[in-house]
Amino acid sequence: MRRFLLVFDLDGTLVDSAPDLRAALNQMLRERGHPALSLAQVKRMVGDGAPTMVARALAASGSDPADLAGALPRFLEIYEANAVRLTRPYPKCPRRSRACEGEATARRSAPTNRSARRSR
């Protein structure tokens, strides 16, 4: 029997984490006196890591790009404390994941940038 590995991307593929990202970004922005971002805006900022996303959020809100040094740690602090409040699996993902459980020879992995504590 052949063994194989199934790799699933977590954020944005198996789960919709954009609402939690938006909430953390908006809290960080409000604390700095900047306007909130829409969910559509945040979704366009995701994909190149937290530093790039925070830099994009600062630019979109009219903030000084030099504020990234202070904004990034604050965003990460807020997000880490609230990373799974609004995040939900996309429709059909739990069912598809369970379908793979019958594959005794398949190992599964879901890479993520989240801390190990938040991704389990």
Image: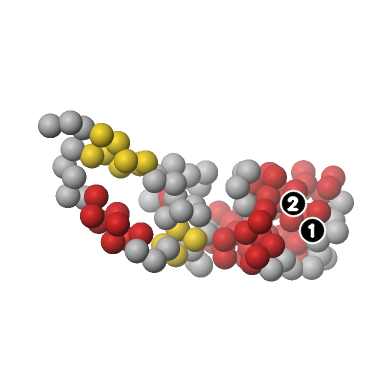
Mark 2 surroundings within 10 Å by alpha-carbon count, few (fewer than 14), some (14 through 19), many (20 or more): many
Residue furthest to the top in view is: 2
Is 80 drawn above or below residue 7 in the view shown?
below
Q: Nearer the viewer, residue 47 or 27?
A: 47
Residue 64 coordinates in the image, percent (x, y): 87, 51
Q: Quadrant of the N terminus?
A: top left
Q: Is residue 110 left or right of residue 51?
A: left
For disc 2, the marked residue is: 56
Point 52% across, 59% down: residue: 17
Residue 86 coordinates in the image, percent (x, y): 51, 67
Instruction: Check disc 1 and report its element: helix, strand or loop.
Output: helix
How many numbered discs, if any?
Answer: 2
Is 34 drawn above or below residue 102 in the view shown?
below
Q: Residue 60 shows which numbered tag?
A: 1
Residue 57 coordinates in the image, percent (x, y): 74, 56
| Amino acid on which the number 2 mark rests in the picture | Arg
Asked whether the residues under the numbered discs 2 and 1 touch, taking CB atoms below 8 Å apart as contact, a structural biologist would say: yes
Instruction: Check disc 2 and report its element: helix, strand or loop.
Output: helix
Q: Is residue 90 left or right of residue 23?
A: left
Q: Nearer the viewer, residue 54 or 93?
A: 93
Whether residue 27 is visible here, answered yes or no, is: no
Is 98 drawn above or below residue 48 in the view shown?
below
Point 44% across, 50% down: residue: 10
Point 84% across, 45% down: residue: 66
Residue 47 coordinates in the image, percent (x, y): 60, 47
Q: Is residue 49 left or right of residue 116?
A: right
